[in-house]
Amino acid sequence: MSPDTTFDVISTIRRKSDFPLWAKLTPNAGNVVDIALAAEAAGADAVVMGNTMLAMAIDIHTRRPRLGNVMGGLSGPAIKPVALRMVHQCYRALKIPVIGCGGIACADDAIEFMLAGATAVQVGTASFIDPGIMQKIIHGIEDYCTEHRISRVPRHHRSGQY
């Protein structure tokens, strides 16, 4: 994926639809900030930072790849540090909302993404493990806000520590 391709795809979709358009960007593609800026310039309403990372695993007993396609998408807690970096970099560069995803399994994870610049978060893998995780995350964020005397989470809330 390149900024030019991203711009072409997003602008084509934007011309054909008035629906909200969020571009979900992969960590597998070059400079994520350049790609996110291209999505914004083409008319994306938000960017979703995270998605799976290309990975593979080998069964040492059979000496064969564990996945039928040899490689596949790595998700869950292992990708959180990469996704946090992407959110932080894009938050600093974009005017549109940045949605964080990748490795969010609890309220603390969601709060980390918000402190890095995410307007909202998406939970994937953890919701398959625990279908009630969203309520737990929401309550955990509420508890955090109460404990830290935050009456309302601003659209772009960051600690400003870095």
Image: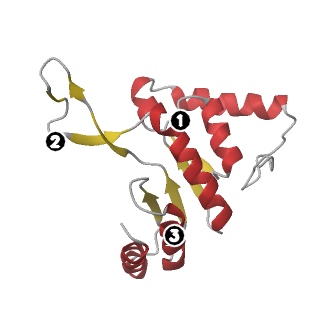
Task: Categorize mark 3 by other alpha carbons within 10 Å: few (<14), some (14-19), many (20+).
Answer: some
Q: Specify the amino acid type for callout 3.
A: Asp
Q: Position of residue 131 (x, y in %)?
A: 45, 27
Q: Residue at x 77, y 49 (%)?
A: 162
Nearer to us of marks 2 and 1 is 2
In the image, which disc is placed on residue 79? none
Q: Is residue 143 left or right of residue 41?
A: right
Q: Residue at x 61, y 34 (%)?
A: 109
Q: Which residue bears the numbered disc 3? A: 34
Whichever of labels 3 and 2 marks the residue nearer the N terminus, that label is 3
Please say if the residues under marks 2 and 1 sit with CB atoms less than 8 Å apart: no
Which of the two residues, 21 or 102, is positioned nearer the viewer here? Answer: 102
Q: Residue at x 51, y 69 (%)?
A: 34
Whichever of labels 2 and 1 marks the residue nearer the N terminus, that label is 2
Q: Residue at x 71, y 45 (%)?
A: 115
Q: CA distance from mark 2 to mark 1?
A: 26 Å
Q: CA distance from mark 3 to mark 2?
A: 30 Å
Secondary structure at badge 3 equals: helix
- In the picture as drawn, the residue positioned furthest to the top comes out as 61
Task: Categorize mark 2 by other alpha carbons within 10 Å: few (<14), some (14-19), many (20+).
Answer: few
Q: Which residue bears the numbered disc 2? A: 69
Q: Which residue bears the numbered disc 1? A: 104
Residue 20 seen: no
Q: How is the image coloured?
A: secondary structure
In the image, is residue 118 above or below residue 102?
Answer: below
Q: Specify the amino acid type for callout 2.
A: Asn
Q: Specify the amino acid type for callout 1.
A: Ile
Q: Position of residue 149 (x, y in %)?
A: 87, 35
